[in-house]
Image (cartoon, rainbow, N blue to C red):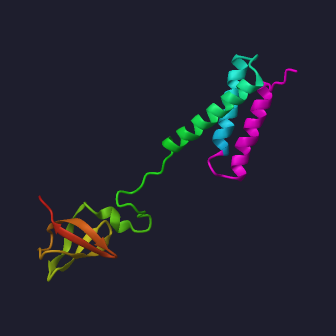
Amino acid sequence: MNVSINVWEWLGLAVILIGLETFIPAGFFLWIGVSGVGVALVLWVLPDISIWFQFLIFAFFSVLSIVASKKLLRKKTHVAGYSTLNERAFHYIGRTFTLSRPIVNGRGKVRVEDTEWLAAGPDLPQGSKVRVIEVEGTLLKVEKAEE
């Protein structure tokens, strides 16, 4: 008894799996579906391969595509190790700005784009260039920037 799956059945399985990804978005069924397309392509070129070899190719493509997707789509972590999505001030660390008000007794103001931020650092006159070294809430800790 010679049982086999043809190209169209593999493509049908691939469409079902990729469609399933639409309803259950996990990034898993998509790659298994892509593996089904891969088996269909191999079967189109080599139409006489056995069903067991087809399943072996499917398993190989599945593992390969999942591993490749994990490496290619790996989320990049922020240098600090946590998300700064809602903390835009953390994006200012290392950048240089101009003091809009002098730092007196350790406190002053720095203009960042269209906003003035409270700055803490060594006493400096208005117009001095400062570099942000740390952020505490809405306070930017600064140091004199090298000009």
Side (left or right) of 16 relative to 141: right
58 or 76: which is nearer to us?
Answer: 58
Percent across and percent down for residue 45 are: 69, 17
Start and end of the magenta stretch?
1-28
Locate the N terminus and report the quarter of the image it occupies: top right
Percent across and percent down for residue 20 are: 73, 47
Side (left or right) of 10 relative to 147: right
Q: Main secondary structure of the magenta part?
A: helix
Q: Residue at x 40, y 68 (%)?
A: 87
Q: Residue at x 80, y 30 (%)?
A: 9
Locate the C terminus and report the quarter of the image it occupies: bottom left
Percent across and percent down for residue 10 are: 76, 31
The extreme right residue here reads: 1
55 or 116: which is nearer to us?
Answer: 55
22 or 108: which is nearer to us?
Answer: 22
The extreme bottom residue here reads: 105
Side (left or right) of 31 relative to 5: left
Above or below, 104 relative to 61: below
Name which quarter of the figure residue 78 lies in: bottom left
Side (left or right) of 72 relative to 144: right
51 in magenta: no
Percent across and percent down for residue 129 are: 16, 65
Q: Residue at x 53, y 38 (%)?
A: 68
Above or below, 34 relative to 77: above
Q: Residue at x 26, y 70 (%)?
A: 111
2 in magenta: yes
115 or 68: which is nearer to us?
Answer: 68
Name which quarter of the figure residue 15 lies in: top right
